Image (spheres, rainbow, N blue to C red):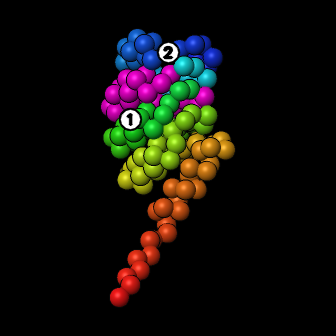
Amino acid sequence: MLHLPYKHIKDDDIPNLVELLQDNKTITKIDLSSNEIGDQGVKHLCDWLKTNTIVEALDLSGDRITSIGAAYLADMLKKNTTLTTLKLRGNKIGILGTEYLMDAQQKRKMPIQLDLNGKKNSITIDLYLQRKLVKPVIVIDV
């Protein structure tokens, strides 16, 4: 496990980290929680993870990820079948980011445990489910 929470890791640090992990054959869990990783850092991670077949769990809780980063993660999840746990609680992915991730999860061949825990994210998941499960009623007045 690569355990790096609270290390003040920023977007600019991620390319170096990815380069170090490029030939990794043993680290299956990466914890980058409570750092300063935003959407650009997530993009670099996702570019690497799209073809990675080793990492099974990624914790990005408490970072600075928005719906843009969630879109990168969703795209990666459609291609990566090894990652089975993704923790994102405490980020500001919003309704749109939640939709990206839930849609990716539905299209994925391998199930993934998404942790979006937190008041704001719980509300966005509820709204997402309402949108997807409740079909709009069309009223035609003649």
* Within-10-Å neighbours for mark 2: few <14, some 14–19, many 20+: some
Residue behind mark 2:
10
Q: Are marks 2 and 1 in contact (CB under 8 Å)?
A: no
Q: Secondary structure at mark 2?
A: loop
Q: Secondary structure at mark 1?
A: helix
Residue type at mark 1: give it: Tyr
Task: Return the residue nearer the eye: 27 or 133.
Answer: 133
Whole-percent x and y of residue 43?
38, 27
Find the residue positioned furthest to the front.
Answer: 142
Residue 9, numbered label: none
How many marks on residues? 2
- Return the disc, 2 or 1, that comes first in the chain's sequence: 2
The span picked out in magenta is 37-62
| Res. 129 visible in picture | yes
Residue behind mark 1:
72
Task: Return the residue nearer the eye: 109 or 43.
Answer: 43
* Within-10-Å neighbours for mark 1: few <14, some 14–19, many 20+: many
Q: Is residue 30 left or right of residue 72?
A: right
What residue is shown at x 46% (from left), y 30% (from top)? Answer: 55
What residue is shown at x 42% (from left), y 13% (from top)? Answer: 12
Residue type at mark 2: give it: Lys
What residue is shown at x 53% (from left), y 14% (from top)? Answer: 9
As drawn, 16 above or below 135: above
The N terminus lies in quadrant: top right
| Res. 83 visible in picture | no
